[in-house]
Amino acid sequence: MQNIRKILLLLLIILLAAFVGYCALIFLLGGPALPNFFEIRNNDAGTHEVTVEILDSHNSSIFKESYKLYPGERASEAKPSGLQYSTGMKKYTFKITLDNGIEEKNIPISLHRWSTAVIDIDWENEDPILIMVYTV
C-alpha cells in the first residue's frame, strides 16, 4: 500500500511538472498575453455613444457596456481570464450599436491570448463601424 501511494504521488508530481513546463514554454515562446479584450477608438469629429455587447460561442451574453466617447478618445476593457490564459482560439460575436441604434453591426470574431479586437468609429468612412483584430 505504501508503494502504491509513492507511485501515485510520483505520477502526480510528473503530471504537474509537465503542465507547468507546458505553460512556461507557451509563455516563453509566445510572450505575455495582450491585456485588452477590445479597444474602441473614436476617430470622428463628433461625440458618440457606443454600446458593445459580446456573446460567447453559445450566444450567451458575457459583456455589455455603453461608452460616451469624445473626438479622439479611446476606451478599452481588460481581457477575461478565460481568454487571457487560454492557449486556443475562442469565438465571440461583437454587437456594436452606435448612437442609440443609428448604426448597428454584428461581427463574429475569433480571438486568442495574443489578439485584441479594435473598433474604429468614423462617420466619414463608408462604413462608420470598422472592427479589426490586432495580433502580436
Image (cartoon, grey):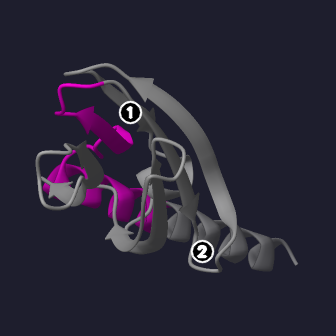
Q: Quadrant of residue 60?
A: bottom right
Which stretch appears magenta? Answer: 17-46
How crowded is the residue under tag 1: few (<14 C-alpha within 10 Å), some, or many (20+)? Answer: some
Q: Considering depth in this image, is 35 or 110 the residue closer to the camera?
A: 110
- How many numbered circles are shown? 2
- Residue 27 in view (yes/no): yes
The residue at 55%/36% (across/down) is 66
- Residue 85 in view (yes/no): no
Q: Position of residue 85 (x, y in %)?
A: 45, 54
Quadrant for the N terminus in the image: bottom right
Q: Considering depth in this image, is 91 or 95 the residue closer to the camera?
A: 95
For label 2, the SS is: helix
The residue at 34%/37% (across/down) is 35
- Residue type, mark 2 in image: Leu
Q: Considering depth in this image, is 69 or 82 the residue closer to the camera?
A: 69
The residue beneath circle 2 is: 11
- Residue type, mark 1 in image: Ser
Q: Quadrant of residue 135?
A: bottom left
